[in-house]
Image: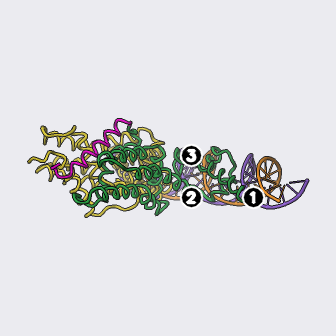
Chain colours: A green, B yellow, C purple, D orange
Amino acid sequence: MAQAMASRRGDRRRALILEAAIAVFMEEGYAGASMDRVVQRAGGSKTTLYRYFPSKADLFAAIIETLVAQMTAPIDHRAVSASGGLAATLTAFARTYLDVLLEPRSLALYRMVMGEGARFPDLGGVFFQQGPGRVATQLADYLRHYELGRATAPVELLAREFLSLVRADLHLRALLGVEIAGAEARSKAVSRAVTLFIAQYPCQE
Amino acid sequence: MAQAMASRRGDRRRALILEAAIAVFMEEGYAGASMDRVVQRAGGSKTTLYRYFPSKADLFAAIIETLVAQMTAPIDHRAVSASGGLAATLTAFARTYLDVLLEPRSLALYRMVMGEGARFPDLGGVFFQQGPGRVATQLADYLRHYELGRATAPVELLAREFLSLVRADLHLRALLGVEIAGAEARSKAVSRAVTLFIAQYPCQE
DNA sequence: ACTATACTGTACGGTACAGTACCAATACGG
DNA sequence: CCGTATTGGTACTGTACCGTACAGTATAGT
C-alpha cells in the first residue's frame, strides 16, 4: 500500500527530527533552542520540520511525551519482576529509580518541565502524575501486598517517604548542576534509605 | 557630602530596579524576561538600568545574590535560637526550613538556577554551598553538640537525610507547578520526618 | 514511464530583544 | 540661584528567531 509505505518513511523522518530536537532542547532549553538549530542537527529542511511539528510548542510537547515514556519504561519493567525479601526488593527498586532519575535525559526533562511550567500550564501536573507519581503508586501497590498488619501509615505515604529518602539531595544536586552522584554514592543512599525505612517498624523481630 | 548623598540616592534607585527585576525574572524566567519590561516595571529609563547593571547577565547575578541572601536569612536566625528537646528543635527548624523553601521567591530562585545552570557555570555550585548546603551544615552542627554517643552515622549525613525527609515530595511538587502544600500538609511532613528520624535510634529508652 | 507524495534549499516578513547614542529634564549641594 | 551629577525618554543598530512561501528534487507504487 502506498499510504503504509509513506507512513513508515514519514515515521522515520519524524523520529529522526524528534531525536535531534531532544538533543538540542536538552542542551539549550526551550527558549534557547532554535528551530533552525534543530533543522541543522536533524539534517533536513525547515519545511519538513514544520510538516511534522506545526509549531515550536507542538515540538516541545512531543519531546516531553517521548522523554517521559523513555524515563518510566525501565521502572515499569522493574516493578513487575519484584521477588525476594522486602529489603532486597526495596534496594533493587530504589537503585533502578535513582539510576533513571540521574540520567542526563531525565535531568533535562525535569529542568524543562520546571522552567516552562509557567508557559505551559497543566504540563507539570501531567508530568508528575505520569512520572514520579506513577512510580510512587507502583511502590505503594507492592507495599500493600507485602505487609498488611504492621503498617505505621498509609502505604502511599510510606512509598513517597521512601522515595524521598532515596533521592536524598542527590537529585537536587544533579539538577542544580553541582555534581551527578557516582555509583558508590548511589549505593550508599539506597542502603541508608532502606535502613531508615525499615527502622521505623517496632523493634521486636 | 555630595558624594555620600549621591551614593544614597543611587542605592535607592538600584534597589528599586533590582526589586522590579526580581519580579519580572520570577514571572518570566531569565530568557523570557526582557530588559524593557524591567524598565517598564521599575518606572525609570533604560539608561539608568544599564548604569547600575551593565548587562543582563550582571543583573541576573545580582538577582541571584539578593534572593539567596533573603532566603537564608530566616534560617540563620532560627538556627541560633535553638533550645528545648531534640524533637522540638527539629520540628521548629524543619518547619522554618520548609516554609522558606516553599515561598514563591525561593521556588523561582531554584528554577532559575536550575534552568540557567548551563549558561552560568559555577552558579549551581555557589548557590548550593551558600543555600541548602549551609542549612545542612547548621543542622549538623546542632546535632553534633546535642548527641555524641548514640549517633548511627556522621552528623552531616544525618542532617541531609533529615532535610530530605522534610522536603519529601512537597518541594518537587511545588517546583513542577503541581501544587504548593498548605499548612496542614507541611505540619504533617515535618512531624513524620521527626518521627522517622528519631525511630532510627535503638529502641531502649 | 507516470503520478502522488515526501523532501530540500533558501529567501523573506514580521517581530522581539540587548545594548547604545543623544538630548532634555530634574534633583541636589554650595 | 548656579553647576554638577543623576535620571528620563526615546530613537536607533544589529541581530536572532518563528513561521511561511515557493520553486525544485527525490522516492515509491502502478
Q: Amino acid at mark 2?
A: Ala
The subunit carrying tag 2 is A
1 vs 3, front mark: 1
* Residue B63 x/y as whole percent: 39, 48
Pick the front one: A180 or B36: A180
Tell me which numbered mark, 1 or 3, is placed earlier along the sequence. 1
Looking at the picture, do discs 2 and 1 lie on one chain? yes
Q: Which residue is mark 3?
A: A24
Q: Secondary structure at mark 3?
A: helix
Tell me which numbered mark, 2 or 1, is placed earlier along the sequence. 1
**Residue beneath the point at 47% across and 63% down:** A121
Q: Which residues are magenta?
A: A182-205
Looking at the picture, do discs 2 and 3 lie on one chain? yes
Q: Which residue is mark 2?
A: A57
The local crowd at label 3, few if under 14, some if 14 to 19, many if 20 or more residues have their Cα within 10 Å, is: many
Relative to A68, B145 lies left or right:
left
Magenta highlight on residue A176:
no
The subunit carrying tag 1 is A
Relative to C14, B40 lies left or right:
left
**Residue beneath the point at 75% across and 58% down:** A2
Label of residue A2 in the image: 1
* Residue furthest front in the image: A84
Q: Secondary structure at mark 2?
A: helix
Magenta highlight on residue A192:
yes
The reply to whether the C-beta atoms of the residues labelled 1 and 3 are less than 8 Å apart is no
